[in-house]
């Protein structure tokens, strides 16, 4: 497991910046709540803040545990969106390292989950809500269909207990 560490923040460039950054919710922000509400309205049931197996302190924003679909709603600033990500000028070197570490941690989390058989869906915060819901719903439906095929393939092969003369 990789270790991701950034030196302590050197301090906000101004009190206004400090207040603004402190007011940003780490979880349950309006965008996350809207996505969860829309998924629920479509009849999808999921877990919120589900821990990433084997990686302490990492959680999925939305997890479909049976279908094994992990959903992350990534903020453009914090996760380095190629279209909308920005690099602060004040404390630039620290922010550059911090954002690069966030992106490396995201890639590590994705690889870890994929190795465990999960499908990872990452959605940028700027993606329209209905489009985001469609992407998640399609991923879950595809996984459920694929799992149904695997279950059907398993049931086509008789177990030793169900064969004639096996006493089962």
Image (cartoon, helix red, strand yellow):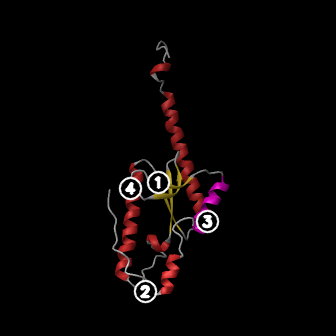
**137 versus 132 height, above or below:** above
Q: Which residue is mark 4?
A: 111
Which sits in the foreground, 18 or 79? 18
Q: Is residue 30 above or below residue 66?
A: below
The residue to which callout 3 is attached is 129
Q: Observer-nearest residue: 156 or 49? A: 49
Quick one: label 1, few (<14), some, or many (20+) residues within 10 Å? some
Residue 51 image label: 1
Nearer to us: label 3 or label 1: 1
Query: Where does the N terminus fall, quadrant-wise?
Result: bottom left
Residue 141 picture location, percent across and down: 57, 49
Q: Position of residue 75 (x, y in %)?
A: 50, 70
Residue 4 located within the stretch drawn in magenta: no
Q: Secondary structure at mark 3?
A: helix
Whole-angstrom CA distance, mark 4 to mark 1, is 15 Å
Q: Which residues are magenta?
A: 29-42
Question: From this viewpoint, which residue is outermost toward the top?
Answer: 165
Q: CA distance from mark 2 to mark 4?
A: 35 Å
Residues at discs 3 and 1 in contact (Cβ within 8 Å): no
* Mark 4 nearby-residue class (10 Å; few <14, some 14–19, many ≥20): some
Give the CA separation, mark 3 to mark 1.
Answer: 24 Å
The residue to which callout 2 is attached is 13
Between discs 3 and 1, the one toward the N terminus: 1
Query: Marks 2 and 3, how far apart in space?
Result: 34 Å
- Taking the magenta stretch, the answer to whether it contains residue 32 is yes
């Amino acid at each position: 497991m990789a270790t991701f560490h950034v030196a302590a923040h050197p301090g906000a460039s101004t009190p206004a910046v400090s207040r603004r950054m402190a007011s940003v919710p780490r979880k349950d922000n309006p965008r996350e709540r809207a996505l969860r509400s829309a998924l629920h309205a479509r009849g999808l049931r999921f877990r919120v803040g589900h821990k990433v197996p084997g990686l302490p302190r990492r959680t999925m924003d939305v997890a479909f545990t049976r279908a094994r679909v992990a959903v992350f709603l990534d903020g453009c600033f914090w996760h380095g969106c190629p279209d909308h990500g920005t690099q602060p000028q004040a404390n630039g070197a620290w922010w550059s390292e911090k954002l690069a570490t966030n992106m490396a941690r995201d890639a590590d989390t994705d690889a870890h989950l994929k190795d465990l058989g999960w499908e990872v869906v990452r959605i940028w915060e700027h993606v329209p809500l209905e489009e985001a819901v469609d992407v998640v719903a399609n991923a879950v439906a595809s996984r459920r269909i694929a799992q149904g095929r695997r279950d059907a393939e398993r049931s086509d092969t008789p177990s030793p207990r169900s064969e004639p003369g096996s006493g089962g």
